[in-house]
Image: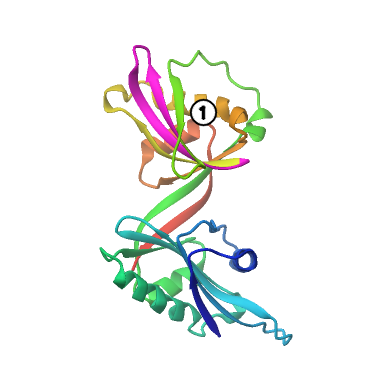
Amino acid sequence: MKKTCTRTLTAAQADAFEQLTGLCRAHDKIRLSCPLDGDRFYLLTGESPDGTGRPVLNSAIAVFEGDGLWECYGFTRPDARRRGYFNSLLEMLEQDAAQALPEPDLCFVADPNGSAAVNALAAIGAELWYEEYAMEWNKDACGNLSPAPRSPSPLRLTSVSGTPESRLDFTAWLSGDQKAGSFSLYLQPPSACLFEVEIAEPFRGRGLGQAMIRQLQDLTPAIGISTLTLQVSGDNLPALRLYKKTGFHITETLSYYLY
């Protein structure tokens, strides 16, 4: 077995990672996926169990480094479980986290319907922190419906490119150049991830959140986007209502475990 830690996946490693997550999704009947733009990856490679001797990715952990918190996605091949592979990678991850300043907490993301992952996290002593929903809006799907008439938006949107270049930061203005709200997009055409949605406190409760999201949806063709995705905490009921009103639907439930 060969263990590797890398900050950038080669094309072959990215393909192997996608194959691994696909196997787990199909076997465990879960929807959890993992973006491949993480900050570091832990990979455990061995020989294929089919006897051909070809290398195969048996287990992997992707890590997204935040301020004081590392978000982790772990996967192990269904035919390679209960062999200590995940724990072996976890030891490497713990050693690297211990050297970071400040030392981060580790948070593992799991599909609550995936009993294998939930049991593995329980075995290492991870505790459920909170649940979150992944939601999606698709312009083509909405295009098949007769849109309800809408009043002209009271908001004017402006945008600037962020860092990295795939990020766009938007500001929503009311007349008189009053900053009413803001949001950001992470572009991965033909989709984009919506995050940091906020309406300024003096303007809340006036339907401006809905106006802002709908104006963004109208702009999607101009930026080459047909799908918007987002994640929202399961206990954030106002945000859930807002996104459902603007055509988003829940695609998966994510559980976050602190280790």
The residue sitting at 47% across, 16% down in the picture is 153
Residue 207 can be seen in this image: no
The secondary element bearing badge 1 is classed as helix
Question: For this view, does 78 lie left or right of residue 259?
Answer: right
The residue sitting at 54% across, 83% down in the picture is 2
The residue sitting at 72% across, 87% down in the picture is 51
Q: Quadrant of the C terminus?
A: bottom left
User: Magenta stretch: residue 187 in it?
Assistant: yes
The colour mode here is: rainbow
Task: Give how far across and how far down residue 228 sits, in percent.
Answer: 55, 39
The three-letter code of the residue at mark 1 reads Leu
Task: Give how far across and how far down residue 32 sits, in percent.
Answer: 54, 58
Residue 217 lies in quadrant: top right
Q: Quadrant of the N terminus?
A: bottom right
Query: Residue tagged by mark 1?
Result: 216
Q: In this picture, which residue range is highlighted in magenta?
A: 169-190
Residue sitting farthest toward the right: 52
Q: Nearer the viewer, residue 119 or 5?
A: 5
Question: For this view, does 98 lie left or right of residue 142?
Answer: left
The residue sitting at 57% across, 15% down in the picture is 149
Q: Nearer the viewer, residue 1 or 228?
A: 1
Residue 10 can be seen in this image: yes
